């Protein structure tokens, strides 16, 4: 979560990140690629004779065509207080050698390793240049590398990868077992996971700081003062960051096991060809088939949902309907996917997705589902059936949805309020950390009785309703009609009367809302956009509102956050 007030005057405001998941949203990725220089590359510099100096190997894809002098100038700004004994690099290299005193090695690595340079991050390793006159091994020499990019399937022992490394590795067709595919960070202890995410956010902040400076240079504008070294130093921020960073907000130890209140499970076949309900392990070579593995050994899935998967798998196996399969130009079968939501009281809402069915088959499938889940003794209080004929399991908005058993919504509790949510409503997947995240967001937003608060991409109104007791009015904007109706109902459920909920695309509703706000009121906003970030019209409308003084940006994707920060804070030409 990030407070993106315009950082031109103190007080300095830190950025923080709330840890709501262990990193399972990295659904794509593959082997890390490394680029080997051509065999005609010049030899590296001679080894330093003085034993008191330490040589470090820096590598970054964007070092190519960069001169040694330019790199040294950049490093001097980044590596504060570290005397650089020597920087050696040829323009064609995407790596360089830096010599520092031995007692400065750890500090240098801390300040430079993982730092964003242009569009890629820098890696720093211990290493010594080859002796003078020695040549790089040829590709066919023992121990040599191919000049082509190499995909690394496994990381070296003891190496702690970045989140980008993990995303790249997961692009491999063979990512490992289902735990590595669905929750890759569980290979590391929890503090290491938090450190990895903290580094990821730090890289994002450095990225928008650096890119803002470049953008201003390209447009012949004076860059904001927060892009400069002196600003970072004065704000006690990490080198190259526009603001200080709080430590990641982790999930308490007692809440780590089975923390997810929402999971989606595919219905397909396992590697043995038997019907399974669980997570997609891999896609077949033709690009269409799905190999599904059970969720039994994935600790972030609650036990009740694991029992749900077993009950649904048994029901599908015994039903006369086949699983949904697709290929190039063809589709067949019925059963597709199961989504479950679990409340803190143990009640469960289930949505089962199938291909479109006739009335008779719909009735038959509904009976199979209801009988199976009622007999599973897992406290299912609401069951929906959804039709979807698309190749993707992500159904289009407006796809047919039917309540086939129980109550229409599931009640969740958050920061002392009750929220009724439906099958399509957005709601944070980690109840415990969600409260910590929203508490921090409201502390930064500082709503009071003379403030109108905008809740953009409001979902079922969670953040807005939690803030409603502190401000004069809350206006929520959301594209999903069902979520807006839930927000209105949740306001009534909690006796909140100072809210206004609008359905529609934020880029269409926000400009009108800003025109209607009482000009005497101060305006603050919280935005919680989907992964692509905010629409350009929304960003423009927010920049054009003179009453808007504070923005809290809750981001699920640091890459789109970087772009939005630049668009929100780019100086005006005048």
Image: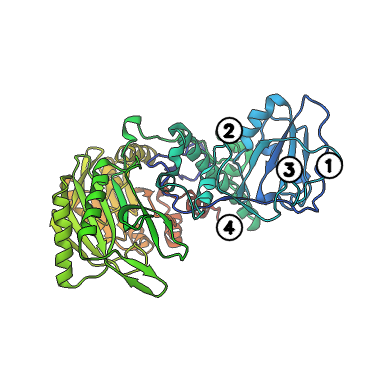
> Gap in Å between the C-alphas at discs 2 and 1?
46 Å
Q: Residue visible at 13% across and 57% down? A: 405
- Marks 3 and 2: CB-CB under 8 Å? no
Residue with the mark numbered 4: 573
Mark nearer the N terminus (3 vs 2)? 3
Q: Which mark is residue 96?
A: 3
Q: Nearer the viewer, mark 2 or mark 1?
A: 1
Mark nearer the N terminus (2 vs 1)? 1
> Gap in Å between the C-alphas at discs 3 and 1?
17 Å
Q: Which mark is residue 266?
A: none
Q: Which mark is residue 134?
A: 1
> Gap in Å between the C-alphas at discs 4 and 1?
54 Å
- Marks 4 and 1: CB-CB under 8 Å? no
Vertical side of 187 occupied by 276: above or below: below
Q: Residue visible at 82% across and 49% down? A: 42
> Gap in Å between the C-alphas at discs 4 and 2?
27 Å
Q: Quadrant of residue 47?
A: top right
Secondary structure beneath dot 3 equals: strand
Q: Which mark is residue 234?
A: 2
Disc 2: CA contacts within 10 A as few (<14), some (14-19) or many (>=20)? few
| Of 59 and 307, the residue lying toward us | 307
> Gap in Å between the C-alphas at discs 3 and 2?
30 Å
- Marks 3 and 4: CB-CB under 8 Å? no
Vertical side of 480 occupied by 439: above or below: above
Mark nearer the N terminus (4 vs 2)? 2
Q: Residue visible at 15% across and 65% down? A: 364
Q: Nearer the viewer, mark 4 or mark 2?
A: 2
Mark nearer the N terminus (3 vs 4)? 3
């Amino acid at each position: 979560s990030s407070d993106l007030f315009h950082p031109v005057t103190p007080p300095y405001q830190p950025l923080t990140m709330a840890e709501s998941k262990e990193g399972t949203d990295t659904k794509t990725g593959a082997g890390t690629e490394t680029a080997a220089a051509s065999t005609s590359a010049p030899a590296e510099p001679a080894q330093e004779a003085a034993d008191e100096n330490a040589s470090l190997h820096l590598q970054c894809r964007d070092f190519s065509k960069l001169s040694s002098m330019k790199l040294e100038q950049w490093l001097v700004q980044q590596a504060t207080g570290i005397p650089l004994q020597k920087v050696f690099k040829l323009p064609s290299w995407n790596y360089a050698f830096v010599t520092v005193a031995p007692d400065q090695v750890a500090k240098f690595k801390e300040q430079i390793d993982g730092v964003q340079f242009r569009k890629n991050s820098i890696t720093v390793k211990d290493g010594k240049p080859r002796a003078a006159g020695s040549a790089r091994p040829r590709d066919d020499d023992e121990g040599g590398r191919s000049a082509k990019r190499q995909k690394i399937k496994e990381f070296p022992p003891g190496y702690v990868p970045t989140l980008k490394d993990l995303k790249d590795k997961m692009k491999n067709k063979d990512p490992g077992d289902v735990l590595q595919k669905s929750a890759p960070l569980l290979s590391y202890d929890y503090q290491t996971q938090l450190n990895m995410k903290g580094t990821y956010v730090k890289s994002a902040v450095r990225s928008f700081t650096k890119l803002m400076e470049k953008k201003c240079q390209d447009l012949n504008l004076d860059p904001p003062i927060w892009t400069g070294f002196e600003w970072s130093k004065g704000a006690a921020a990490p080198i190259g960051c526009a603001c200080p960073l709080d430590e990641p907000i982790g999930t308490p130890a007692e809440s780590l096991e089975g923390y997810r209140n929402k999971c989606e499970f595919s219905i397909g076949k396992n590697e043995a060809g038997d019907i399974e309900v669980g997570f997609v392990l891999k896609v077949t070579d033709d690009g269409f088939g799905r190999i599904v593995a059970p969720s039994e050994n994935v600790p972030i899935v609650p036990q009740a949902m694991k029992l749900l998967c077993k009950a649904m798998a048994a029901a599908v196996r015994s039903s006369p309907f086949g699983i949904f399969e697709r290929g190039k130009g063809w589709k067949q079968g019925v059963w597709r996917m199961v989504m479950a939501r679990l409340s803190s009281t143990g009640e469960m809402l289930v949505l089962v997705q199938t291909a479109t069915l006739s009335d008779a088959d719909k009735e038959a499938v509904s009976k199979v589902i209801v009988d199976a889940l009622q007999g599973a003794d897992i406290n299912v209080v609401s069951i929906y059936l959804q039709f979807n004929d698309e190749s993707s399991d992500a159904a289009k908005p407006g796809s047919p949805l039917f309540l086939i058993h129980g109550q229409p919504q599931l009640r969740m509790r958050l920061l002392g309020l009750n929220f009724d949510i439906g099958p399509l409503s957005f709601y944070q997947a980690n109840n415990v950390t969600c409260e910590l995240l929203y508490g921090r967001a409201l502390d930064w937003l500082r709503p009071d009785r003379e403030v109108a608060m905008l809740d953009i991409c409001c979902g079922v109104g969670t953040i807005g309703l939690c803030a409603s007791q502190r401000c004069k009015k809350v206006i929520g904007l959301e594209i999903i009609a069902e979520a807006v109706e839930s927000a209105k109902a949740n306001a009534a459920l909690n006796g909140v009367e100072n809210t206004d909920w609008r359905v529609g695309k934020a880029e269409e509703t926000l400009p009108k809302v800003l025109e209607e706000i009482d000009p005497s009121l101060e305006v603050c906003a919280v935005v919680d956009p989907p992964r692509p970030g905010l629409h350009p019209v929304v960003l423009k409308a927010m920049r054009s509102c003179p009453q808007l003084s504070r923005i809290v940006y809750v981001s699920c994707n640091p890459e789109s956050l970087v772009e939005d920060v630049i668009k929100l804070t780019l100086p005006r030409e005048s």
